[in-house]
Amino acid sequence: MALPGEEMVRETIEFMKLALDQAKLALDCLEVPVGCVIVEGGEVIALGKNRTTETRNATRHAEMEAIDVLLEQWQKSGLSQKEVAEKFSKCTLYVTCEPCIMCAAALSIIGIKEVYYGCGNDKFGGCGSILSLHAGDQSSKGFNCKGGIMASEAVSLLRTFYEQGNPNAPKPHRPPVQQT
């Protein structure tokens, strides 16, 4: 029989594997490979993957995609704004890369309970790498956050994406600098 802490670790790994599956789907679509799942009561209730290239919309990060699935579903169910907030306060997000500043702010504002992420985000991280939006402020209560879950797998996917080059990236205005 597993101890309570061991069961939580096992569950965290299983949900992160599902997030990595979403990241792989994003990679297959030539998107930056970031994926996530939102869980409530031990059940996956939303999936998300980056879709910025497909939609030509820079805000279509995995977290925003999953949040929008739930917002649409809960609004169709007739839940009030207060009921939606209550639902989010019971949810956990598992995402392959530290949420960027935009996503961390959104997660804080909607009042998500907690976030587990894979690798850090040195350029845009909103959960400690650049800003600590998970800590909350006057406009949001913040959320618990833990990184480093299956980070090497997440980094490997990102490395694959950047090594293959992004055929959808805009062409540079200046020629690349030649190394001598």
Image (spheres, helix red, strand yellow):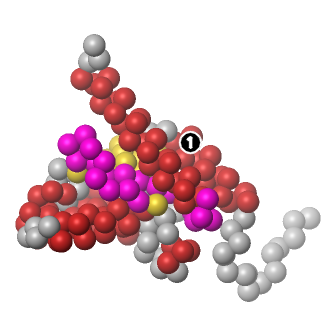
Quadrant placement of the N terminus: top left
Q: Amino acid at mark 1?
A: Glu
Q: Farthest residue to the right: give it.
A: 180
Q: Is residue 180 magenta?
A: no
Residue 105 seen in the current view:
no
Q: As displayed, is residue 51 above or below residue 144?
A: below
Q: How many marks?
A: 1
Q: Is residue 42 magenta?
A: yes
Q: In the image shown, does 92 or 119 lie closer to the viewer? A: 92
The image quarter containing residue 11 is top left
Query: What residue span does the magenta drawing correspond to?
Result: 28-48
Q: Farthest residue to the bottom: give it.
A: 173
Residue 122: percent from the left, percent from the top? 52, 57
Q: Residue drawn at (31%, 69%), measured in percent from left and top?
A: 68
Q: Which residue is mark 1?
A: 153
Q: In the image shown, does 148 or 167 lie closer to the viewer? A: 167
